[in-house]
Amino acid sequence: MSTVLDSIIEGVLEDLEARRISEVELAEQISAAGEVRDAYAALSNPGTQIIAEVKRASPSKGPLADIADPASLATRYESAGAAVISVLTEARRFSGSIADLKNVRQAISLPVLRKDFIVTEYQVRETRAIGGDLMLLIVAALDDHQLRDYQSLARELGMNVLVEVHDQEELERAVASSAKIIGVNARNLKTLEINDGAFAELLPQIPEGIITVAESGISTREQVALAEGFGAKAILVGETLVRAGDPAQAIMTLLRR
């Protein structure tokens, strides 16, 4: 039975074929992409860190915000103390684009996370070519060989990887893959349902030395405090920030700064 995640990936692969360039061109773009910014170091700074997301829409909520100038929003995030800026590049369900990521990265000095459904080696290379510093890999979308190989390739290209899990089995696979940054997503991308107990169940099990990120469903300082109590080193927040009248103030409220 097809899941929401399966449907998203099907569209991602169709869109990929429409923009694919030669390996030679891709290698040239990687060479011209400039120095990688260290997302691991940024998330390792003292205190709880925030990955602030440029997000226009989602499969579960539909349109969220009309973001005409992603770069401007990202600079506001940066000024409020974000550690990393996340940019959706998936077009069909999230209304994102590669152009959004390029524009954001030119406007800020922070590391940039490419938030997409990366299921091919080409997309790993493409992420570096467009300026990505941190790359999302969703365990539910990959087999164990892909999970290891794509992380290895990303590191060869200088990038860090955020490995996303939703349940116990995926967490075990992520840890076995030698992931250095693991995100627990409370929203199951196969069903779009929120698991309110995901942070409590999974975050405490992540071994020391791995940066832990709490993702989805965070809108209040109280929720951040709970995630911190379960072991989150960072939070990833999109909807709450893009819907806030003052996203910079929203960041400071969440982090109590």
Image (cartoon, rainbow, N blue to C red):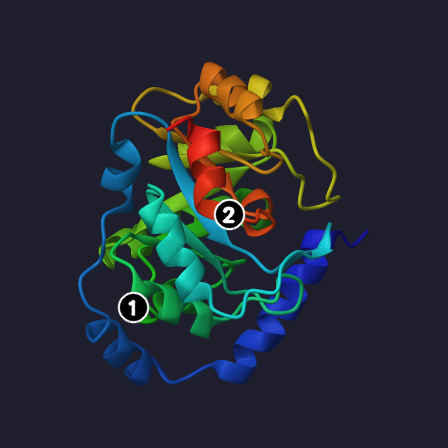
Which label sits on residue 246? 2
Residue ID at (61%, 65%)? 66
Q: Which amino acid does the dot numbered 1 rest on?
A: Gln
Secondary structure of the residue carrying tag 2 is loop
Q: Is residue 158 left or right of residue 140?
A: left
User: Which residue lies under the disc numbered 1?
Assistant: 106
Residue 252: percent from left, percent from top: 42, 35
User: Image quadrant for the C terminus?
Assistant: top left
In the picture provided, is 65 more to the left or to the right than 128?
Answer: right
Q: Position of residue 118 (x, y in %)?
A: 49, 59
Circles 2 and 1 in contact, beta carbons < 8 Å? no
> Residue at image x 55%, y 56%?
55
For the point 58% across and 29% down, the residue is: 220
Q: Position of residue 157 (x, y in %)?
A: 25, 59
* Nearer to us in this view, 218 or 68: 68
Q: Indicate the amino acid at tag 2.
A: Asp
Give the label, 2 or 1, closer to the camera.
2
Q: Is residue 1 left or right of residue 210?
A: right
Front one among 190 and 245: 245
